[in-house]
Amino acid sequence: MLRTIALASYAAGVAFASSNCAKPNLKAPACPDKGTITYESRVPTQADDFPRTQVDLCYTESALVLTFTAYNETTFYFDPEQGTNGDIWAYNVMEAFIYKGTDDPQTYFEYEINPDNVTYQAFIYNPSENRAAGAPFDHMFVSKPAADGLKAQTTLKKDEETWISEAEIPLAFFNVKNGQAKGTEWRMQFLRTITSEATFPDQELGAWNPPDEASFHISKYFGHVELV
Ligand SMILES: *[C@@H]1O[C@H](CO)[C@@H](O)[C@H](O)[C@H]1NC(C)=O
Ligand SMILES: *[C@@H]1O[C@H](CO)[C@@H](O)[C@H](O)[C@H]1NC(C)=O
C-alpha cells in the first residue's frame, strides 16, 4: 500500500526489500536542508484518516535532527507526573524507531517525545521482529540522555492545533562517526499516539507505514531512509 509522501526537494519512491510489504522511503540531506514526510495513516486499519503528522529529518556532523509536527492536535494530553523514560507512550507522543542498516531490524532505537517536552529513549530488543507472544522483548533505557548529547525542544501552538518537537540524536548511537553520515542507509518508522482525558487509556494510533495490527513493533514495516 502506498503512503502519502512529500519530500522537500528530493524524489520519493517505494522500495521493496526482503519481506513482501511495500515500504516508503525518505532521502534526508545535511542540515539546514531537510527531507520531509507526512502521514495520515491509522494503525491498524491503514485508513488515511489520522490527523496529519509530519517529520523533517536532516543530519549534522554528529547528530540526526528530527522535527516532529503534530497537526490537528486538540488534546495535548500528557501526565505531568511523568519524567524522562516514563510511560509517556500511554498518552500523546510522537515517536521515531531508528536503525542503521537496510534489513528488518531486531534491535533499534526508540525515541518518543510528549507535549510536555518529556522524552523516552531506549534501545529495543525485539528478536522476533514483531513482538511475538512468548518471545523476548526488552528495553535498554538511555539513562543520561542530556550527557549523551540528546537534545529536545517543544513548542505548543494551541490556537493552531499544532505541536512541534525537535530532537537531536547522536549519530554515534548508531556507530556513525562524526562527518560520516552522508550515504548511510537506515530503516525508520514514525509514529504518533493520541488520547484524551475522556478516552484514556484508549488511543488513536498513526504511523508512516502502518502495520495491519495494533502494534508498532513490527520491523518489516519500517521505511527506508538514506542520508544524502
Ligand atoms: C487539520 O489542520 C488543518 C491545518 O493544519 C486544517 O486545515 C484542517 O481543517 C484541520 N482538520 C480538522 C479535521 O480539524
Ligand atoms: C525541553 O527539554 C530539553 C531537555 O531534554 C531542554 O533542553 C529544553 O530547554 C526543554 N524545553 C523546551 C521548551 O523545549
Image: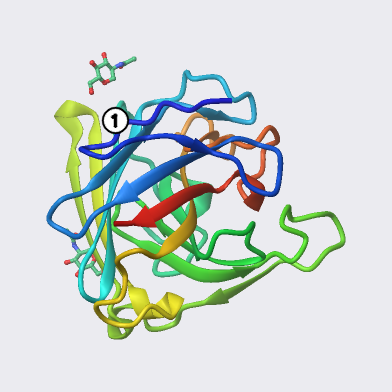
Q: Is residue 94 above or below residue 110?
A: above
Instruction: Name the residue rendered at 68%, 32% in the picture.
Output: 212
Q: Disc 1, ligand 1: is the CB inside 8 Å?
A: yes
Q: Is residue 218 visible?
A: no
Tell me the element at label 1: loop
Looking at the rendering, which quadrant does residue 133 occupy? bottom right
Q: Is residue 213 visible?
A: yes
Compared across the picture, whether 22 is left or right of 59 comes to: right
- Nearer to us in this view, 162 or 59: 59
Looking at the rendering, which quadrant does residue 134 occupy? bottom right
- Residue 90: x and y, percent? 53, 49
Badge 1 amino acid? Tyr
- Nearer to us in this view, 126 or 199: 126
Instruction: Name the residue rendered at 34%, 61% in the picture.
Output: 118
Residue behind mark 1: 71
- Nearer to us in this view, 168 or 105: 105
What colouring method underlies this structural image?
A: rainbow
- Residue 77: x and y, percent? 38, 41
Instruction: Name the residue rendered at 61%, 46% in the picture.
Output: 216
- Residue 202: x and y, percent? 59, 35
- Counting other residues with Cα less than 10 Å from the Cα at mark 1, is it few (<14), some (14-19), or many (20 or more)? some
